[in-house]
């Protein structure tokens, strides 16, 4: 019997008109439990004392790690094409906006 390779399944992904517009986010709050990762995307604007969550993504730890790997791979491809992405200065005052990783516990990015 010859070696048979399983056929890759093709997934047809539908992108709705509203979702195609996308959202802008400069703050993601990431929490986790043993069973899931929760990523809340929001934006902080100057002079606005309140930030609203515009999207929440809940995923398994395995898929969170796959997302991390996919982002790393795509950032490497981007930097190969367009140059290094520079992160200027220190984290913003008050810890708002996407932040460099910290050690231990819950992370806010």
Image: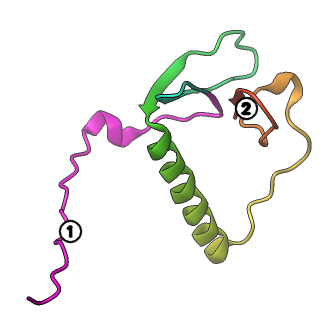
How many circles with numbers are drawn on the protein?
Answer: 2
Q: Point out the residue furthest to the front here.
A: 1
Q: Which residue is mark 1?
A: 8
Q: Point out the residue furthest to the bottom here.
A: 2
Q: CA distance from mark 1 to mark 2?
A: 39 Å
Q: Position of residue 80 (x, y in %)?
A: 65, 76
Residue beneath the point at 56% across and 15% down: 52
Q: Is 96 positioned to the left or the right of 62 in the image?
A: right
Give the number of the disc on residue 89.
none
Tell which of 81 and 63 is nearer to you: 63
Q: Measured along the vertical axis of the image, is residue 83 above or below residue 28?
A: below
Whether the residues at callouts 1 and 2 have beta carbons within 8 Å, the answer is: no
Residue 16: in magenta span: yes
Q: Point out the residue furthest to the left here.
A: 1
Quarter of the figure that contains the C terminus = top right
Q: Range of the magenta residues?
A: 1-30
């Amino acid at each position: 019997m010859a070696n048979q390779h399983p056929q890759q399944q093709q997934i047809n992904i539908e992108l709705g008109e509203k979702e195609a517009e996308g959202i802008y986010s400069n703050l993601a709050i990431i929490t986790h439990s043993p069973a899931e990762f929760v990523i809340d995307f929001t934006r902080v604007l100057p002079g606005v004392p309140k930030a609203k969550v515009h999207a929440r993504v809940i995923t398994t730890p395995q898929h969170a790690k796959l997302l991390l790997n996919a982002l790393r791979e795509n950032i490497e491809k981007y930097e190969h094409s367009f140059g290094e992405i520079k992160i200027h200065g220190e984290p913003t005052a008050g810890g708002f906006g996407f932040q460099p990783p910290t050690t231990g516990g819950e992370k806010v990015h």
